[in-house]
Image (cartoon, rainbow, N blue to C red):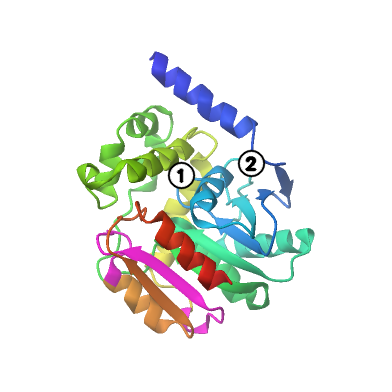
Amino acid sequence: MGRYRRDLDMAQQRLIHPPALLSVVGGVEYLQVGTGPPVLVLHGNNGGWDQAVDWAGRRIPAGFGVIAVSRYGYLGSALPADATTAGQADDLARLLDHLGHDRVDVVSLSAGSTAAVRLALRHPDRVRRLVLESPVLPAVRPLRLPPTPALRLLLRTEWPTWLTSTRPEIVARAGGVAWKKLDTDARHELRQIMETLLPVRSRRAGMLFDNAVTAPEMLRDELAWEQLAAPTLVLTAEDSPLPKPADAEAIARRLPQGRLEVQPSGGHLLLGNVPRLQALLRDFLR
């Protein structure tokens, strides 16, 4: 019980003391780190601006300015009563207006892929290049999502997620890699990612929205991939359960300017590929 309370307190303190000024514009919470050409980073499930900042520290090289946002219902971002993924894309475009950015590069992680693609489709003049890292995608064998009522019950307390955070080997296995195959750096990488899972309470509404709306929309293949104008880089790994390389390849073929990069290992979180992916993103974004 002592460790449980200590870990939750540390997680809360991390949110209270962000690495840069935290602001909310039009219901969208964001912060900016670094300077240079802007890169809008959209986190995955169970994330927030903190997950986006954590990711950027491993992927975005010096010379870029990162705009880390919390998507609908996560941390300090609102979840409108009539929330849609299209509305979220429009809110992101309004945030860019507020920041004075005509065009930005956009990166999405996992479940953030729906918002990223919606933004690129609805506001093609605002997205210069698009990166989809381990995106949720239409699949030959679609992901089976938990029933929303069951997920709502699971997220009523911090305990289940906290317990998971103490067992990185379970998270690694769920992501497609064996803990024993990860070197020291990859294990540290996973532990850093898992620190962004808590506290759950301030992410609960966003996770439920992702489960009920965001992910199903993607899995039903409702997005017009063939109309995506921005050059798009899709990233996955040979051992990733989501997306599987074949599903990522199928989407990349539908893109007018699609490019697929499959890492030899790393699972859904692409663990152990930091130098390779940082170089890849640097070249693609520049």
The circle on residue 46 is 1
18 relative to 246, above or below: above
**Residue 117 is at least partly visible in this image:** no
> Helix or strand or loop: what does disc 1 sit on?
loop
Q: Nearer the viewer, residue 113 or 194?
A: 194
Badge 1: few (under 14), some or many (20 or more) residues near its Cα, within 10 Å?
many
Q: Looking at this rendering, what residue extends furthest in the top direction? A: 2
Residue at horizontal 38 percent and vertical 76 percent from the top: 251
Residue range of the region highlighted in magenta in the rendering: 225-245
Q: Which mark is residue 140?
A: none
Is residue 242 located in the magenta-colored stretch of the structure?
yes
Q: Viewer-proximal residue, 153 or 244?
A: 244
Magenta stretch encompasses residue 114: no
> Vertically, is 215 above or below 175?
below
Q: Say which mark, if any, is on residue 76.
A: 2
Q: Label 2: few (<14), some or many (≥20) within 10 Å? A: many
Q: Quadrant of residue 106?
A: bottom right
Measuring from the top left, give residue 271's x and y in whole percent. Answer: 35, 51
